[in-house]
Amino acid sequence: MNPFDSFAADRRRWLAGFALSPLAASLAALPLWTRAATSGCVASSDWSSFAKRHIQADGRVIDFDTAQQQSTSESQSYGLFFALVHNDRDTFARVLAWTDANLAGGSLATRLPAWQWGRMSDGKTWGVLDSNPASDADLWIAYSLLEAGRLWNLPRYRSLGRAVLQMVARDEVTTLDGLGRMLLPWPQSVAKGPTWRLNPSYMPLQLLRYFQQESPRGPWGEIADNTLSMISAVTPQGFAPDWCAWSSDDKAFVADPDKGPVGSYDAIRVYLWAGMLDAEDPARTMLLKSFYGPRRAIQQGKPMPEYVDTSTGVGRGIGPTGYTAALLPYLKAQGAAVPFLPPPSSTHKPLPYYERMLILFGQGWLEGRFAFGKTGELQTHWKSPCPSARPT
């Protein structure tokens, strides 16, 4: 058994124990995992049903739960990643083509993609709604292209991935006084100091590790170190905020001037990235120690709150189904056996795009469909899927 198969088998054993919980069985909105834990195949994921609903024939990934019926550079980047995870070359090519043509003006090699595209204010025409790029999507696009080039032996993808990564380093990285180089959420041209807004979920450590290997002279190692410093500073109650900021005046991380110390739909990804981090990464222990909030809440029999004041640890609301899926890798890494699971919705309305994407990440990782190596490389498990546990 190779190391990846051993790793996947370990996760399947954990899932087998998890699936025995009556709480786990009650969450009908999530796909069934028990078949993956008891057979040699890879469990069927939600990828095919996600693609059928959210990805058009031309490669546009749609968020139907927005007024603009928007597509974002984030949705396109995740579409690329999961097409690669599922060895779906056709979908990868279509998603890339749409992204290039509609978000980058047909020149992704020289222009970072606009972050938002959809129905315009006149209600009739469609196009770019905000031309500024978003750095998290740009990182995932670069990563997916570089790894597609490696795994599929297609040099054109690697070349394009390098070009995107170079533009990110040029346009979306700046040196913050008193800190050093850091990834901004958007281009330097629209960022403002002396209080510089940052988004912790935009900086998955496994991607930064990968880029450090890909571009040793780039800023990625320094950004990784500064990301760890940021996380340590902004999690006083063990919860991550959606946004925070660096004050060049105070030389310190501070609460975000616009959003305040709130953790919700962005921050849920911070626990997801940490949970999927390779066990040999030297920062893993520190990250899990910093993020004790969700684990503590669950051990106390409480749900993960939809919103939490990260300065006090006080939450409100119950996180949706996607939160539960996103927390599963984190809970396994924390050694937690059974999370608190909210009851499924009484309706059969399809889950929103973002929740389904979180499920693809959390469930796919636990099923052994993919993992991130110590230096961030993508490890795939391209085997035949198990028979479907439910209709797609």
Image (spheres, helix red, strand yellow):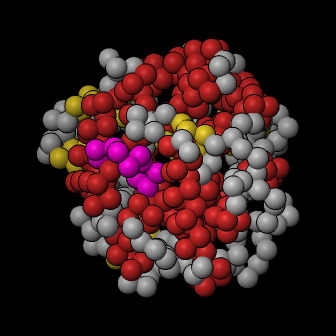
Q: Say how many tags the image has.
A: 0
Return the x and y of residue 151 as percentages of the image width and height: 62, 27
Magenta stretch: give its range. 274-283
Residue 82 in view here: yes
Q: Quadrant of the N terminus?
A: top right
The secondary structure making up most of the magenta span is: loop
Q: Quadrant of the C terminus?
A: bottom right
- Look at the picture and state if 315 lies above or below 22: above
Return the x and y of residue 356 as percentages of the image width and height: 66, 58
- Look at the picture and state if 192 lies above or below 305: above
Q: Is residue 283 left or right of residue 250?
A: right
Residue 56, by quadrant, is: top right
Return the x and y of residue 220 as percentages of the image width and height: 34, 29
Return the x and y of residue 389 as percentages of the image width and height: 79, 66
Q: Nearer the viewer, residue 215 or 231?
A: 215
- Does the magenta run of residues contain 371? no
Kindly identify the residue that appears in the image at 32 percent across and 25 percent down: 219
- Does the magenta run of residues contain 277? yes
- Look at the picture and state if 92 lies above or below 272: above
Q: Is residue 19 left or right of residue 179?
A: right
Q: Nearer the viewer, residue 27 or 321?
A: 27
Residue 64 in view here: no
Q: Is residue 240 left or right of residue 39?
A: left
Residue 309, by quadrant, is: bottom left
Kindly identify the residue that appears in the image at 61 percent across and 40 percent down: 380
Q: Nearer the viewer, residue 134 or 318?
A: 318
- For this orientation, the residue located farthest to the front is 1
Q: Nearer the viewer, residue 13 or 74?
A: 13
